[in-house]
Image (tube, coloured by chain):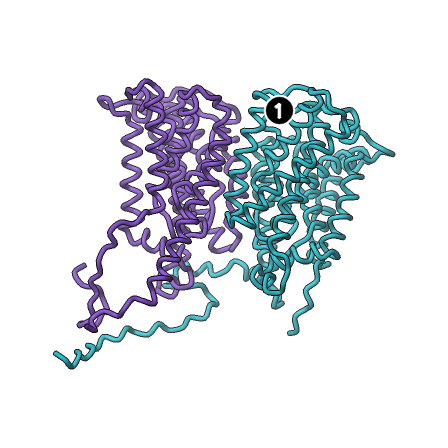
Chain colours: A purple, B cyan
Amino acid sequence: MSSLPHVPSGVDVSFQRPKFIWQRSYTAAVLAVLLLVLDVNQSNGHFSTIQALGISNEALPLALVAVGETFVILTNGIDLSVGSIVTLANVTVAVLAGHGLAGFGIVLAIAMGAAAGLVNGLIVCYARIAPLIATLATSSIIVGIALYILPYPGGSTIPGWLSSWTAGTIGSIPVSTIWLALAVVAGWIVLRRTKFGVNLQALGGNEASSWSAGIRVMRVRTLAYVAAGVCSALAGIALAGLTQSGDPTIGAVYLLNAVAAVIVGGTSLSGGVGTIVGSIYGAIVLSLVASVLFVAGLSTNLQFIVTGVIVIGALLVHSLQSKRGARIVRRARPTSEPRGDS
Amino acid sequence: MSRQRRSYLRPVEVAGPYALVALALIGGGLAIPGFLSLSHLSSMSGVAAYLGIIAIGQTLVLLLGGIDLSVPYLINLSAVLLVGFQVANFSGPSDFALVLVIGLGLGLVNGLGVALLDISPLVMTLGMNSILQGIAVIYTGGSPQGFPPAFVTTLATGTGAGIPYVVLLWVALIVLVTLVLVFSRFGRSIYSVGSNRTASALCGLPVKRTIIAAYAISGLSCALGGILLVGYQGSAYIGMGDNYLLPSVAIVVIGGTSLAGGKGSYIQTVAGALLITVLQSALVTINVNQAGQDVLYGVVILLMAYFNQVAVSREGGGSKAWLRGLHGLGGWLEPVGRRGDVVAPIPEPVREPVPRATGE
């Protein structure tokens, strides 16, 4: 990485890193920290392990689904089947754990998530059905399959190791917090340090250009849906551990909340702009709202209104910010001199 | 091949979904005794009417290339407000009107956010749905009390000469909406803005006003749907609108209206509502469980969306186009691009050294 390819010698390609840019995900991060401080402050100022456990257990499944949704929204699509895949994975693990095959259940759930994502991707790419409709239809099919596997909510024998791997603690750190941190790192590596991730961002930014540049557009887009499927399946598995049961209606909540978390996290719905960590901040924000309202002594029924205001407000902030950025770039352009003349 | 003048209702596209409805009815009639009896037909059309009335607004919004995700709690809040006003001893007809006005106002807020603040419709209506859910929950404390006024119950459940009043209302609305879409200036600007917003603005159409009005109508139709629903069920509960969001989008698409906007009509949505209702009724009668219904529902949406997509890409004509729609399956194996797309060769980058500046 010492020199850029195809740059003629004699042209100065060194550039200065901008001093500080307020990235879109920072807004969500500030909001998350603010809510966390409020939460801690209201509960007499000390932050216990129990509290941390509650917060990160609440946030983990939503964050995982939001990470998956981010991949798809980055391609300028949307995946409405994530909630159903959560349900399918949850139900699969619960039923197989009842037969003493929890390990196999987890592998199968991930495979089913990947397969569902693959089907979504293939339909969107090759049958050219709009992502909204294609995933709406597959969502219905997947829920049907989940209902076939487990028609009613059932607490089965989820093994102890699965719940201690999701709801347990290591020392005073909740395991789910470790999973969240791992998701941040893994998401960053996949999106910023792999060919797939870079291609994905290029594709979302400008499909025609990235196609001309030799990116296999169809394949990258399909893989984005597969990633969403796998992440949602992981969320379903985590839910099996956290709730100790299987429930064929458990995933419905996660669909719209995941989209909301991605939006709060600063990922643009028109594709190409966004971060994994932003979506995780967004998920933390959304899962903190109810808790903060509760410790503040307000009605938790307010959470829906607060959530709605946060989603619309965050989008307004992001769009104002990108408009301001565009204005600065426009203003800067005429005055910038070509380098190397003086 | 000369291109046809764009008409707002294309006979073939309208006839297609209706042919499927007829097919489903005939199939049901052959397989299930009594499926085509008058009483069963009228009950099915009643079920379709609720869905169809709710989807009026969704059709207009999708024709504009937008989407309304606040349908569930527009419905739910209207239902909850109607029974709540009854408890507060308001009079029936004025409640009815007041709830409709509130629905219109909430839709208007959606429209203002989308048109003036330039918020993406998905986000605006998603956030709005959450806010409305909060209002509904706080207003009722979680468990709505009270009953709908008597005339609403009559409207929702009564029949005249064997035909449910809801169906009569629906037919009137179908005629009204279709006339507005095809003949009025507002209807035509919906198609125009949906096809190309920039061009419509340059032509001097009131783009923002059209968008705001469409979302307001969506609020109004959901409010009417909520009122009828609470009249039918006799009481309101939190979550009663949840099962209408995805079907309201699905039937519009099944009817052939394009998500990209500018193409489709409400008559086609009506066919979508009828098709889904007839299929579901048939499945319930032959004892297919919920799982099977969900799978079949998804398959129907996929197939209809696929054939509509093929119909769009076929606009140059040609046979076997439905096969060509499975576009470039070999593309997975090819190095780049889709089959059929023209590829301009990418020139090799020039690697010659650039001459140094003469000063050195």
Quadrant, the N terminus of chain B: bottom right
The amino acid type, in three-letter code, at marker 1 is: Tyr
Q: The disc numbered 1 marks a residue on which chain?
A: B
The answer to whether A85 is drawn above or below residue A193 in the figure is above
Q: Nearer the viewer, residue A319 or A266?
A: A319
Q: Quadrant of residue A326?
A: bottom left
Of all residues, the one furthest to the right in this rendering is B161
Q: Is residue B339 visible?
A: yes
Q: Nearer the viewer, residue A135 or B240?
A: B240
Is residue B172 rendered to the left or right of residue A274?
Answer: right
Is residue A114 rendered to the left or right of residue B196?
Answer: left
Q: Quadrant of residue B25?
A: top right
Q: Nearer the viewer, residue A98 or B7?
A: B7
Q: Is residue B254 visible?
A: no
Image spot of residue A214 (x, y percent): 35, 64
Image spot of residue A288 (x, y percent): 39, 29
Q: Quadrant of residue A241?
A: top left
Q: Which residue is mark 1?
A: B237
The answer to whether B4 is drawn above or below residue A304 in the figure is below
> Which residue is rendered at x = 56% and y = 61% of the image?
B198
> Which residue is rendered at x = 36% and y = 57% of the image?
A328
Of all residues, the one furthest to the bottom in this rendering is B358
Classify mark 1: residues with Cα within 10 Å, few (<14), some (14-19) or many (20+). some
Is residue A231 rendered to the left or right of residue B145?
Answer: left
Image spot of residue B278 (x, y percent): 70, 39
Q: Nearer the viewer, residue B212 or B271?
A: B212
Labels in figure, total? 1
Element under disc 1: loop
> Which residue is rendered at x = 23% and y = 69% of the image?
A339
Image spot of residue A1 (x, y percent): 18, 59
Quadrant, the C terminus of chain B: bottom left
Of all residues, the one furthest to the left in this rendering is B360
